[in-house]
């Protein structure tokens, strides 16, 4: 079951370099939120803070009012690469984080997660025997099988070709419909952001702050050719261009 996520006045520095300059974001339970912004603005860093992988920051991050103080079973994270164990089958990789990975309940959960991601017939395949897109679907299944309240995705489709990427976007939406986590997606692909998200948060140049928030109006299922999605993409491109222009003028 999903829970709301709150990021309140978060600031982060690496030594003397400020990376995140005060970010406030609220994500209602079950919403899909996309984070976009210039390269190096701290999107992935913010995701690591939400995941509890880095606790050295100012501000507060909470799920359903409970502060995140480190890695938390309520929060799942999918990286840019699948990071599967090469000596384990896809089913064993998906089961890895479960309390009793060999038990009957774990087998049921794993089978369900693999089926949602379209991998039921590849449960016993090793990672080296499947494509990159299938490996990333297995990584998504591994994150979903524990039924996290918040799921974080750090550019999970960035290394895939355009056709595979679109297919995985639809697999992700199907999985979201099944598990309904609160979902935060970091992406550089503006088409992906407006196709998947309920809202798109645009972060500024480093040290990042929330520059704009755009609501995506079309109901799901969406048509990628919808003119309103194209309009949102253009608005995001213009906002990014203005941000770069302002930085260039300041420098």
Image: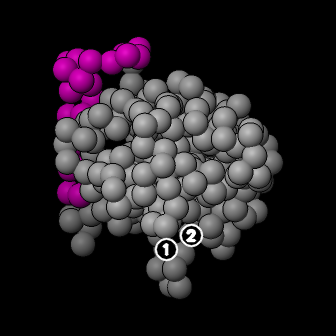
Q: Residue 178, position in %: x, y?
A: 56, 26
Left or right of 248? Residue 69 is right
Picture coordinates of residue 96, whole percent (x, y): 63, 57
The tag on residue 12 is 2
Element type where label 1 sits in the image: strand
**Is 244 a magenta residue?**
yes
Residue in the foreground of this view, choosing between 247 and 50: 50
Q: Is residue 82 above or below residue 121?
A: below
Q: Residue at x 47, y 79 (%)?
A: 17
Quadrant, the C terminus: bottom left
Q: Is residue 229 left or right of residue 218?
A: left
Q: Give the main secondary structure of the magenta stretch.
A: helix
Image spot of residue 163 (x, y percent)? 19, 38
Regarding residue 203, the answer to whether it shows in the image is no
Q: Is residue 16 magenta?
A: no
Q: Callout 1: few (<14), some (14-19), or many (20+) C-alpha neighbours within 10 Å? A: some
Please state which of residues 103 and 211 is positioned toward the viewer in this rendering. 103
The magenta region covers 218-245
Mark 2 vs 1, N-terminal side: 2
């Amino acid at each position: 079951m999903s829970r709301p996520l709150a990021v309140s006045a978060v600031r982060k520095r690496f030594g003397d370099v400020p990376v995140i300059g005060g970010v406030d974001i609220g994500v209602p339970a079950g919403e899909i939120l996309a984070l976009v912004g210039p390269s190096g603005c701290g999107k992935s860093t913010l995701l690591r803070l939400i995941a509890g992988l880095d606790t050295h920051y100012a501000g507060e991050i909470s799920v359903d009012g409970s502060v995140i103080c480190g890695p938390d079973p309520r929060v799942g994270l999918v990286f840019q690469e699948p990071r599967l164990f090469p000596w384990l089958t896809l089913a064993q990789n998906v089961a890895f984080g479960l309390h009793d990975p060999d038990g009957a309940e774990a087998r049921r959960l794993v089978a369900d997660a693999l089926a949602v991601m379209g991998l039921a017939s590849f449960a016993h395949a090793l990672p080296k025997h499947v494509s990159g897109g299938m490996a990333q679907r297995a990584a998504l299944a591994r994150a979903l099988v524990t039924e996290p309240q918040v799921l974080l995705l750090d550019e999970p489709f960035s290394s895939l070709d355009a056709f595979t990427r679109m297919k995985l976007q639809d697999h992700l939406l199907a999985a979201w419909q099944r598990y309904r986590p609160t979902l935060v997606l970091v992406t550089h692909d503006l088409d992906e952001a407006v196709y998947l998200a309920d809202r798109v948060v645009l972060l500024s140049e480093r040290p990042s702050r929330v520059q704009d928030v755009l609501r995506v109006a079309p109901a799901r299922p969406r048509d990628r050719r919808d003119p309103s999605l194209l309009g949102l993409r253009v608005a995001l491109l213009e906002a990014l261009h203005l941000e770069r222009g302002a930085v260039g003028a300041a420098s």
